[in-house]
Amino acid sequence: TRALSLSRLAYDMESLVSPILAAALLTVVSFHSLFAGTVVGFLCSAALVMTVSLPKSPAVEVTGSVYKKTFRGISIYLRTPRLLGLLALNFAAAAASSMVIVNTVVYVESKLGRSSSDVSLGLAAFGCGSMLMALILPKLLDRRPDRPAMLLGASVMTVGLGFGTVVAAAGGRFEWPAFLATWFVIGLGYSMTLTPSGRLLRRSAGSTDRPA
């Protein structure tokens, strides 16, 4: 659980810090130099990944047609009721995150008439909510099962999107802080929904089925 939370925390931190770091570097180096440095960074990351040793699952010979072998993984997934629920939750998380990723810039600049730096603040509000929940979840999941937490996360995202609709329709002087609060709440629900999914996958598939 803690590893999953740290993974979510690292993902959100990268999303928040990378644009800030890139903007800071562009004040002292050219765009081409920054791009070259990014390439070097990716190569170093690939080298580090190659040094990691992963546990090996016992080899299992799968018989049948090419079609059966190709779709074995999705077949196992769709035959597992618990994973069908996870699929529905992933759809909910995808809907909420796509709203944030796609519409933040449109809403902030076109609807609110604010600057591009405020777009970063909106995305930061979502990321901060996600990171905060990633820090809280390990202790929460020590006392509560995964299912209620994930369902609560999906409910929080739904309520957040509904509240966002009300905020957009109402407008007014408090629309900007209400927008930031909405994105923060959606980030909380997003992390609460997705972070425990690795535990669910591990419990729902045997070690020989996970490579599928």
Image (tube, rainbow, N blue to C red):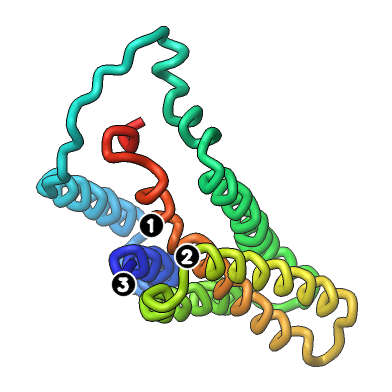
Q: Is residue 164 left or right of residue 116?
A: right
Identify the secondary structure beneath mark 2.
Answer: helix
Identify the secondary structure beneath mark 3.
Answer: loop
Q: Gap in Å between the C-alphas at discs 1 and 2?
A: 8 Å
Image coordinates of residue 183 in percent, x first then y, are: 64, 75
Q: Residue at x 27, y 39 (%)?
A: 207
- Which of pointers 3 and 2 lies earlier in the amino acid sequence? 3
The disc placed on residue 28 is 3
- Front-lying residue, 198 or 22: 198
Image coordinates of residue 170 in percent, x first then y, are: 89, 81
Q: Amino acid at mark 1?
A: Arg
Residue under circle 1? 199
Q: Is residue 1 left or right of residue 161?
A: left
- Mark 1 and 2 residues: CB-CB less than 8 Å, in contact? yes
- Front-lying residue, 179 or 74: 74
Q: Gap in Å between the C-alphas at discs 1 and 3?
A: 44 Å
Identify the secondary structure beneath mark 1.
Answer: helix
